[in-house]
Image: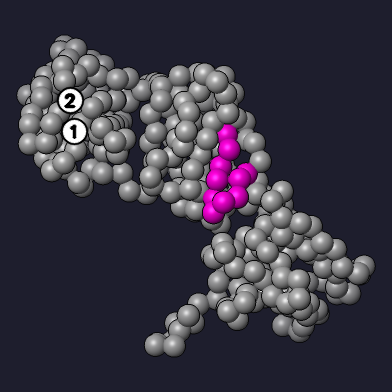
Amino acid sequence: MFYVIMFILQFFSDVPDSVDVPVTNTLQSECIESVYILRARSETLEELQLDHSIEPSSTLSISFPWGFLRKIILLSEDGTVYSVVNHAIPSNPDTMKIDLSMKEFGRILERVYGSHPLLIGNNSGVSIDSILLIGDSLPPGNLLGCNPLMPSEYVRFWLDTPDPVTFLFYSGGYVSEELSFSTDPDTIYSISNSSFFHNGEFRRTQQGNYSIIVANCISSHDIFTIEVFDEFGYSLLFQNVIENPLGMWDRIQLFTDYPPSFVVCSDEAIRTYSLDRPDSTTGCYEFDLLSLDFDFSFPGGR
């Protein structure tokens, strides 16, 4: 309720434009080099003016705008991100303490290179190790930093340009196709398994009445066998590919005489993976670690 009241007051009350907030760095070995804010009704990131960096165990007074802030982002000297979400700056603020509880960990990663937002979700089944931008005037090197982008996580880039930019995503030595996105606060872009399919080969088997495509998106494991079942659990097809395993990002088109319902694969360690439907965008049965069949028995479970 306190945050709601402050949010309303900033539009109807005579309040100060800015407030000096004591910010204490309780981190043991990291200096805070820059601070950014996202106001309540803004989609543009603003950098606050610091007189100097905030050394460990020291305090610096920083001028914040009065009122409700959607996010405060603090960057250390090595690029580590600390953040505060939905924070109110009152007229008489308490000391803001920067500690490890504010450290970025999963959910939405923030990478600040400008003020315009571009949000990308990892809809693939693999972790993204690094992300590069293509263009002379764009930030060089790996924009992701030391934290990988895990499946179902998001990264929000703040860029200087509102123009479309082209990304390359890297995972386990594989590189995605080039993907172009524009900074837009209302759009969530995504990287999917299909962006890596060009790294593998596409195979076909004999013809049949019904066709399915199986894709290996399992990190560091080959598919050795594929079995297709109907809705009653009867096997329609067993494909042994041990002599020429389906490597990562490889796809194979299979045919059955009757409608397929679910597919089971196994890898070189005889682990099994199951899917009861293809991906809605590619039409492929995309096997990754999320489709692994877990054996919860103990201690012999996988």
Seen at 54% across and 54% down, the residue is 172
Quarter of the image for the N terminus: give it: top left
Q: Which mark is residue 283?
A: none
Q: Is residue 39 magenta?
A: no
| One can see residue 7 in this view | no
The alpha-carbon separation of the residues under discs 2 and 1 comes to: 6 Å
Type of amino acid at the residue the image marks with label 2: Ser
Report which quarter residue 76 is drawn in: top left
Seen at 29% across and 36% down, the residue is 78
Predominant secondary structure in magenta?
A: strand
Q: Is residue 172 magenta?
A: yes
Mark 1: secondary structure: loop
| One can see residue 115 in this view | yes
List the residue tagged with mark 2: 53
Residue 104 left/right relative to 215: left
Provide residue 244's location: percent of width, then percent of height: 76, 71
Mark 2: secondary structure: loop
Q: Which mark is residue 31?
A: 1
Magenta segment boundaries in residue numbering: 167-176
Residue 16 left/right relative to 273: left
Provide residue 146's location: percent of width, then percent of height: 38, 45
Q: Nearer the viewer, residue 55 or 294?
A: 55
Report which quarter residue 18 is drawn in: top left
